[in-house]
Image (cartoon, grey):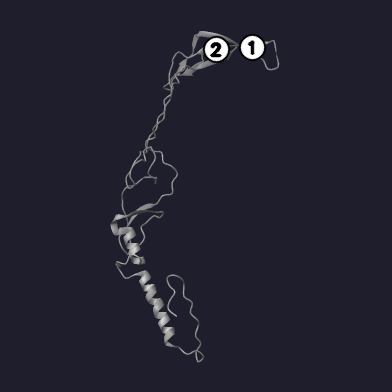
Amino acid sequence: MSTNFPTSLDSFSTKTDNVDYVQAAHINDLQDAVEALEAKVGIDSSSVDTSIDYKVNNFFVENTRVVYLYENTAPTGWSTTGLPTDRVLAVKGGTHDYNVNGGNEAGSWQVDGLSTGNDSHKHQWYEYAGPSDADETWDSSGTQVAIDKSAKNPKGILVSGDTEGKLNFDAYTSTETHNHSVSSDSSWRPYAAVGILCKYVGA
């Protein structure tokens, strides 16, 4: 028989000494199989586009194609690119910062889009049994300031379970109207599986 490879695998029968006679077909079948295997693998720098050698070399295109490896050091035949560093992996497309061509960088570690909104306000203090000179609130810088007790505003609050009696709490308001700021820096990092970017340089 001739070889079935690479369409399917060959099956050879085991020969027994002093029982089976080796014939030309036996050797020829093996030779056919070896030749088919060599053609599939290809010679060094093969130009046959169906050979494995051609596919491997032309897929990586030495020193040009970059791949991500979830490793710490480059394997044999590979070299780290050195750049870019400290990045996450992203898929191109969409309408946001990643809407660039593949092979380019986009985005920033700076967290943006944060806003305090329209939250200008004053702090209010409720106190039972009269005002105290020690009562304080806080301004937008975090400094304690005295409560404006001129804006006294009694609030009647029902005691739980009592439909008639009320406790009178005095309400005081801080003197400053302010916003609370929101800030960010570039120290934040997402939880990541860290690897390396490598180029194939040849075995």
- Residue 163 can be seen, yes or no: yes
Which of the pair 122/95 is nearer the observer? 95
Q: Residues within 10 Å of mark 2 (few under 14, many from 20)?
A: many
Q: Quadrant of the rendered structure where residue 42 is? A: bottom left
Which of the pair 96/50 is nearer the observer? 50
**Picture quarter with the N terminus:** bottom left
Residue 67 x %, y %: 36, 54
User: Label 2 belongs to which residue?
Assistant: 171
In the image, 64: left or right of 177? left
Whole-angstrom CA distance, mark 1 to mark 2, is: 13 Å
In the picture, the disc for residue 167 is: 1
Query: Disc 1 residue type?
Result: Leu
| Residue at the image position 53 percent from the left and 16 percent from the top | 125
Q: Residues within 10 Å of mark 1 (few under 14, many from 20)?
A: few
In the image, 181: left or right of 155? left
Which of the pair 159/11 is nearer the observer? 11
Query: Hey, which residue is sitting farthest front in the picture?
Result: 1
| Residue at the image position 36 percent from the left and 73 percent from the top | 38
Q: Quadrant of the rendered structure where residue 119 is? A: top left
| Residue at the image position 36 percent from the left and 60 percent from the top | 75
- Mark 2 residue element: strand
Residue 51 x %, y %: 35, 67
| Residue at the image position 34 percent from the left and 55 percent from the top | 198
**Picture quarter with the C terminus:** bottom left
Query: Disc 2 residue type?
Result: Ala
Residue 26 x %, y %: 44, 84
Residue 66 higher or lower than 77, as above or below: above
Which of the pair 1/163 is nearer the observer? 1
- Residue 78 can be seen, yes or no: no
Residue 57 higher or lower than 43, as above or below: above
